Image: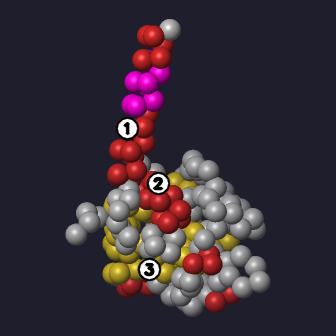
Amino acid sequence: MFLIKNFIIILTTCFAFLLHAADQRIQPDTIYPRIKIETTLGDITVELDRRRAPRTVDNFLTYVVNGEYDGSIFHRIMPGFVAQGGGYNKKYEELNKQAQISNESGNGLLNRQGTIAMARLNDPHSATRQFFFNLADNKHLDPGKNWGYTVFGEIESDLSILEKIESVDTEFNSQLNQPNVPKQLILINRITLLPHN
């Protein structure tokens, strides 16, 4: 009995340590973590806002530090609206998702040009891994009488890369059964969490 109790204590301690280590990888004490998104059209640096969207930022950064966005694509480009990605690989296969997260759209951050927000289904609390950049001021995506789409950061540099992404020709893709899919593959080579200054 004594050995079993000691084993349980050791196991619990190890599990807590691993959780703590995982938490530390997403810079929990950094209010405005920064990421670099390396794409086939150039690099974008984004500043995230943990103060306004803590659950969303932590969820996003967990995918980032686990390398789960590396090799994904921008699969939906609608000029003057959004550039969406992070959910499919270059074979248009859907990538693994973690649990859905609570909607934080009432945080005061608005869907303005150059901001990053979470994609979701009609259920307001259905966001997982897909994100989008606002290519214009999309006021209709902000919360009002209904839930909006959670903004959790904005582009720090280079907005011209977003303009390159926006200019790519699109078509209907039979594999995704969706319109607005880029004819030219826009690959997210890697997303990294930048060191805290």
Mark 2 / mark 3, whichever is N-terminal? 2
* Quadrant location, the C terminus: bottom left
Q: Residue at 45% x, 54% y: name it.
A: 62
Magenta residue check for 9? yes
Tell me the residue that label 2 is attached to.
63
Mark 2 against mark 1, which lies toward the viewer?
1
Hey, which quadrant is residue 178 in on the image?
bottom right
Marks 2 and 1, how far apart in space?
A: 20 Å
Residue 114 shows up from this direction: yes
Circle 3 SS class: strand
Residue 70 shows up from this direction: no
Provide residue 164's location: percent of width, then percent of height: 42, 81
Tell me the residue that label 1 is attached to.
17
Marks 2 and 3, how far apart in space?
A: 18 Å
Give the overall secondary structure of the magenta segment. Answer: helix
Q: Nearer the viewer, residue 118 or 78?
A: 118
Magenta residue check for 177? no
Q: Residue at 51% x, 58% y: name it.
A: 59
Marks 1 and 3, how far apart in space?
A: 33 Å
Residue 69 in the figure: left or right of residue 92: left
Q: Which portion, as a residue range, is magenta?
A: 7-14
**Three-letter code for the amino acid on which mark 2 is drawn:** Tyr
Numbered mark located on residue 2 in the image:
none
